[in-house]
Image (tube, rainbow, N blue to C red):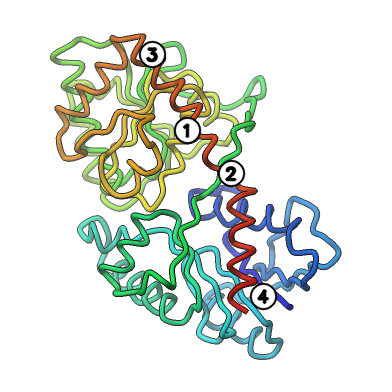
Amino acid sequence: MKIGIDGSRAFLDQRTGIEEYSYQTIKHLAGKLDEHQVVLYLRKKQVPDFELPSNWRIKKIRLSRFWTQFGLSLELLIHPVDALFIPAHTVPMIHPENTVVTIHGLEFEVMPEAYSPWERFYMRMSIKKSCQWAKKIVSVSRSTRNDLASIYDVSKDKISVVYEGYDEKLKVNAPAGGEKLEAGDNDPYLLFVGRIEKRKNIEGMIRAFEILKKNHGVPHKLMLVGRPGHGYEDIRKQIEKSEFKNDIVETGFVSAQKKQELLEKASVFLFPTFYEGFGLPILEAQNAGVPVVSSNVSSLPEVAEGSALLVDPREPEFIAGAILSLISDKKLASDMVRKGKENIKRFSWEKCAGLIKKIIEGAD
């Protein structure tokens, strides 16, 4: 069988959630498709940073805009494949009958106020069409599968739940003389990693932090790591108006090495977001030995499975209470760290790629 794989989101210098998923699934599929011919579709400047098997070949598609719908569609028209795997949402208009697509979440439907009208229109159109065109859908959680069924009326028989992976052996050591932060390196801090946007409930985290500072006098800083996203202007205004603004540190995007260092030194990892298709940052924090406060909504209880303190994300007082519990009760924090280490053993990129292989082969 000749299998095509969309690698356009995998080989980027600064990968976030979906890009990391694309990278890891392709990397781990590379050793599992020996009996097939594989074509990896990339953008013109992309280069894999790992060795590909001899039965794989790279096809560069040189369009810089409309890469999927024009470039990839045209390539598939001229050089058809028997099966196609799309690890990031968007199936091209021209595609084989045996197409498998991974859907990561319907955040824009659950929280439309956190997206621009254009973003909502584009994502709704592309994901609805992808669900119609694909023969099989990979959902990264049961929560996302249920959303696809209830919101887009996709048959659950068409959807396979395959959890994202995680490498519990992953340790990235920050080199000496690496990135510097303006504040917080020697102070205790609460940490959030992700896009700084409304959907991530940054405003709720700031309000919870203010409660902790005002009512309980905690010495911690709040460190926000990530690029600005939708609604960042309002978040920035909120920080500027806060009486504790000097204790709120924004780092912007940081390298994998620096992120690992920040995780390992954090007192508590915060992830009380409004919606997540999966929630990989929980596993990253647990692997670093940090107790986690997360939300009791969407896929997050499914990912944490009793190994984090779960709160209503719309109640800053509850968020603050959970954080205070972990800061003040060393036994509770230690118990959460232990449970976190056990929890990450449920997730593996090898397992994820193995299940996707079976789905691709079963679609033929």
Q: Which mark is residue 343?
A: 1
Q: Position of residue 305 (x, y in %)?
A: 37, 37
Q: Amino acid at mark 4?
A: Ile
Which residue is disc 4 drawn over?
Answer: 61
Labels 1 and 2: the sequence-earlier one: 1
Residue type for callout 1: Asn
Q: Residue at x 23, y 32 (%)?
A: 239
Q: Is residue 349 left or right of residue 140?
A: right
Residue 81: give x, y in percent of width and height.
Answer: 68, 82
Q: Provide residue 87's location: percent of width, then percent of height.
A: 55, 63
Residue 41: image quadrant is: bottom right
Q: CA distance from mark 2 to mark 3?
A: 31 Å
User: Whole-Å distance between the Cαs marked 1 and 2?
Assistant: 11 Å
Circle 3: residue type: Pro
- Find the residue positioned furthest to the bottom: 78
| Residue, disc 2 | 348
Judged by depth in the image, the label closer to the viewer, 3 or 1, is 1
Mark 4: which secondary structure? strand
Q: Is label 3 in a helix, a strand or a loop?
A: loop
For label 4, the crowd category at 10 Å Cα-Cα, with few meaning under 14, some 14 to 19 and many 20 or more, is some
Image quarter in which the C terminus is found: bottom right
Q: Nearer the viewer, mark 4 or mark 1?
A: 1
